[in-house]
């Protein structure tokens, strides 16, 4: 039979974790101190408001409507898609910043509104708004 020394094995049963806790707290303090310095502050130069004595007039809006029957109107004038394209091309030539608001009726075939938006894209009018109504 072998003799086993109980004093040697008893030290393994009692593990002292105090140095491990000290190390953990030191690392925690280091991370707490360095974290604010690592954060990257975003510097923004916001534009200052211009004081303009001559306020520019609001842009002229052109209204395109599509009613329940699918009839297209530009500024209350009924027209078909080819006529709309020609009229929008004329408006775009006169003013490069032409603004258009498209209003489709609630029961209109959605494809008609998409056709109008396609014409606006072909004519390269980019300032387009879609009019909506609130329902209660």
Image (cartoon, helix red, strand yellow):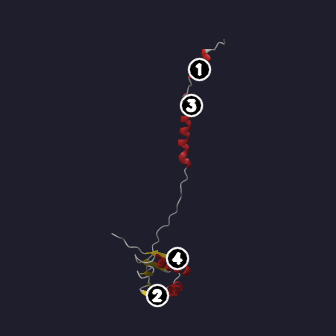
Find residue 7 and report its image quarter: top right
For the C terminus, the image quarter is bottom left
| Label of residue 126 in the image | 4
Label 2 with label 3: CB-CB less than 8 Å: no
Estimate how packed mark 2 is, as few (under 14), some (14 to 19) or many (20 or more) residues with alpha carbons within 10 Å.
some
Nearer the camera: disc 2 or disc 1? 2
Q: Nearer the viewer, residue 108 or 78?
A: 108
Provide residue 42's location: percent of width, then percent of height: 53, 57
Instruction: Answer whether labels 2 and 1 touch (C-beta < 8 Å).
Output: no
Residues packed near mark 4 inside 10 Å, few (<14), some (14 to 19) or many (20 plus): few
Determine if residue 5 is in view.
yes
Please identify, in this view, whether the residue under mark 3 or under mark 1 is nearer the observer.
Answer: 1
Looking at this rendering, what residue extends furthest in the right direction? 2
* Residue behind mark 2: 79
The earlier-in-sequence mark between 1 and 4 is 1
Q: Mark 3 vs mark 1: which is more N-terminal?
A: 1
Determine which residue is flagged by label 1. 11
Q: Which comes before the other along the chain, label 4 or label 3? A: 3
Figure check: 33 above or below 126: above
Mark 2 or 1, nearer chain start: 1
Give coordinates of residue 133: x percent, y percent: 38, 73
The picture places residue 109, in percent across and down from the top left corner, at 45, 77
For numbered disc 1, what is the local secondary structure?
Answer: helix
Q: Nearer the viewer, mark 4 or mark 3?
A: 4
Q: Is residue 37 left or right of residue 134?
A: right
Q: Is residue 16 above or below residue 4?
A: below
Task: Work out how far the residue at label 2 is from the one at label 3, CA to CA, in angstroms.
Answer: 83 Å
Q: Secondary structure at mark 2?
A: strand
Residue nearer the viewer, 62 or 59: 62
Residue at x 46%, y 69% (from the top left corner): 49
Secondary structure at badge 3 equals: helix
Alpha carbons under labels 2 and 1: distance apart: 97 Å
């Amino acid at each position: 039979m072998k003799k086993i020394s109980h004093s040697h094995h008893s030290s393994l049963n009692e593990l002292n974790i105090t140095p491990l806790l000290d190390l953990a707290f030191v690392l925690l303090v280091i991370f707490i101190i360095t974290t604010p310095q690592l954060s990257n502050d975003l510097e923004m130069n916001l534009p200052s408001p211009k004081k303009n004595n001559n306020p520019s007039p609001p842009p002229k809006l052109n209204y395109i409507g599509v009613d329940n029957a699918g009839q297209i109107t530009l500024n209350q004038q009924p027209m078909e898609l080819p006529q709309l394209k020609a009229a929008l091309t004329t408006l775009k030539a006169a003013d490069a910043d032409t603004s258009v608001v498209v209003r489709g009726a609630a029961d209109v075939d959605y494809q008609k509104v998409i056709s109008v938006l396609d014409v606006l894209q072909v004519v390269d009018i980019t300032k387009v708004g879609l009019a909506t109504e609130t329902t209660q």
